[in-house]
């Protein structure tokens, strides 16, 4: 039994194995907002754990200590003002303790002031279009060829042999690290949703309507997400990939795009 349970428990509680193939918790992410969201989630989780311990603990004690076989007689009272005040005030206090930091975080999530660059994201069936506002740079991002070939019936390609199967694109969104980026998002046909777990971003793309938000990535690297709104038969084949470069490398990449020398 120990040979089974110990590795399992170890994997569940091993901290930033949040990036494992199957995670049972939110990822901490690479933005201040994602870290703040994770902290709020864990704060609420431990409050719920505490409530569960108190409630179920009291229930279990009552079941064993005051059971009929012990000769205990049920109480006959039907009203207790003090008890009602207690079980009304305590939940109100708990809700306020949760609501204040949550409201503060929600306001910050929507605050796009002070952004350093803007990107327009448009969802299509079944790809994304990225436009760097004011830079005259834009391109489509579609499922990478290797994944597209492997997903086809009769391809005889084992998907397990394809790196980042269904989570890779031909052209990723490229952004600079440590830069507050405002994004405007819409759709050209049906509902889509741009979801990037590492950024704590999931924003709907609605035809005829523009949503906005922002993110600021603290670590360079490649991050992967997906469309999170069922948008048609190829919904599962429009991943999101963001490549975060140093500011120097991003400037060189942008210059190459403008000169038409990009690969």
Image (cartoon, rainbow, N blue to C red):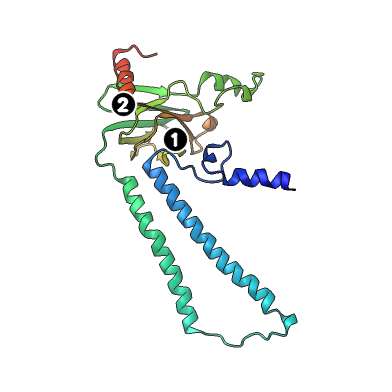
Element assignment for label 1: loop
Residue 61 in the image: state x and y as whole percent.
64, 73
| Whether residue 193 can be seen here | no
| Mark closest to the chain's N terminus, 1 or 2 | 1
Residue 24 in the image: state x and y as whole percent.
57, 45
Image check: 60 left or right of 236?
A: right
Furthest toward the bottom, the residue is: 76
Image check: 22 left or right of 240?
A: right
Image check: 254 left or right of 150?
A: left
Q: Real-space Cα distance between discs 1 and 2? A: 35 Å
Image check: 2 left or right of 205?
A: right
Quarter of the image with the C terminus is top left
To which residue does mark 1 refer? 190
Element assignment for label 2: helix
Seen at 52% across and 28% down, the residue is 167
- Kindly identify which numbered label has been placed on residue 247: 2
């Amino acid at each position: 039994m120990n040979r089974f349970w110990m590795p399992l428990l170890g994997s569940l509680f091993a901290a930033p194995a949040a990036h494992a193939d199957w995670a049972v918790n939110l990822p901490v992410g690479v933005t201040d907002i994602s870290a703040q969201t994770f902290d709020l989630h864990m704060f609420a989780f431990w409050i719920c754990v505490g409530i569960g311990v108190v409630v179920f603990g009291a229930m279990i004690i009552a079941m064993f200590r005051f059971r009929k076989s012990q000769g205990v007689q049920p109480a006959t009272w039907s009203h207790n003002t003090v008890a009602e005040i207690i079980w009304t005030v305590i939940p109100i206090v708990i809700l306020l303790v949760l609501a204040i930091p949550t409201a503060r975080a929600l306001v910050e999530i929507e605050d796009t002031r002070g952004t350093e660059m803007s990107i327009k994201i448009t969802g299509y069936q079944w790809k994304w279009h990225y436009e760097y506002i004011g830079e005259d740079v834009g391109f489509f991002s579609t499922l990478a060829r290797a994944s597209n070939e492997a997903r086809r019936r009769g391809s005889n390609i084992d998907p397990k042999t394809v790196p980042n199967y269904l989570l890779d694109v031909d052209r990723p969104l490229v952004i600079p690290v440590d830069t507050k980026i405002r994004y405007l998002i819409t759709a050209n046909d049906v509902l889509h949703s741009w979801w990037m777990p590492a950024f704590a971003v999931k924003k709907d793309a609605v035809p005829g309507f523009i949503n906005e938000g922002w993110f600021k990535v603290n670590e360079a690297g490649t991050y992967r997400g997906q469309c999170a709104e069922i948008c048609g038969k190829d919904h599962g084949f429009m991943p999101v990939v963001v490549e975060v470069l140093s500011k120097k490398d991003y400037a060189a990449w942008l210059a190459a795009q403008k000169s038409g020398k990009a690969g």
